[in-house]
Image (cartoon, helix red, strand yellow):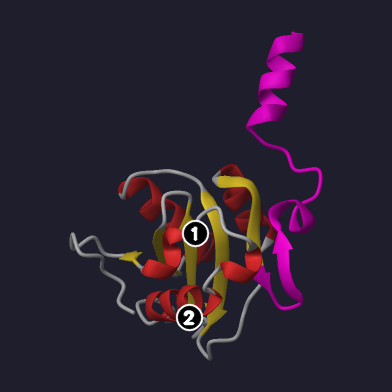
Amino acid sequence: MTDTNASGDQGVTDTAAADAATSLPSDLDWASLRDAATAAMRHAYAPYSSFPVGAAALTDDGRIVSGCNVENASYGVTLCAECSLVSQLHMTGGGKLVAFTCVDGDGATLMPCGRCRQLLFEHSAEGMLLETVSGIRTIDEVLPDAFGPRTLVTYQQEH
C-alpha cells in the first residue's frame, strides 16, 4: 500500500477494500487501514518526543486518507496525526469518515486523545468505527454525549 493515490494526491489511497464505505464492520479491511497509518507514521516529524504517530481513515466515498504527527519546539503548536488526516480529508474532496485507526512507531494501535476524538467526531459519519486497544468501537462509544454542530444549531434555534 502506498500513501499516494492514482492521481498523485499524497495521503490518499484508492483501494478495492475501500469499496465498502457502508459495509458491516467485519467487511472492513482493517489491515489496509493499519498499513496506510503505518506508511503515514513514517513521515512523522517527532524530534522532541521520538514518538511518531500515523493515522488513517476510510471515507464515505471509499478513499483512505492518512496523516502523521508534526511536533514543534513550542509543544502546544504540535499537530497530532488526526489533525493532518482531517486536513487531508478536506484537501482531497471532503466527505465523512466511516472507519479510523491510529498507530505508534511500532505499529501498535493507539487511542486518539480527547482533543482528537472531538476533531474526528466533527468529521465522522454516523456510527464511525474506530480501531482501539480494546477492539472496534463507535465514535459515540469513545466520545459519549459529544458537543458538536447539532449542539450549536439547537442552541441557536432556542435563542
- Left or right: residue 90 versus residue 31 is left
Q: Label 1 sits on what residue type?
A: Ala
Quarter of the figure with the C terminus: top right
- Looking at the image, tell me whether mark 1 or mark 2 is earlier in sequence order: 1
Q: Which residue is found at the position 69% from the left and 14% from the top?
A: 156
Q: Which residue is found at the position 75% from the left and 51% from the top?
A: 140
Q: Measured along the vertical axis of the image, is residue 105 above or below residue 61?
A: below
- Left or right: residue 155 versus residue 48 is right
Residue 56 location (% of width, % of height): 47, 67
Of the pair 91 and 20, the residue shown nearer to us? 20
Per the image, the residue denoted by label 2 is 52
Q: Label 2 sits on what residue type?
A: Pro
The alpha-carbon separation of the residues under discs 1 and 2 comes to 29 Å
Q: Measured along the vertical axis of the image, is residue 57 above or below residue 32?
A: above
Q: Residue furthest top?
A: 159
Residue 97 location (% of width, % of height): 52, 52
- The part of the chain drawn in magenta is 131-159
Quarter of the figure with the N terminus: bottom left
Per the image, the residue denoted by label 1 is 20
Q: Which residue is found at the position 63% from the left and 31% from the top?
A: 149
Of the pair 115 and 136, the residue shown nearer to us? 136
Of the pair 31 and 94, the residue shown nearer to us? 31
Circle 1: is it few (<14), some (14-19), or many (20+) Cα within 10 Å?
some
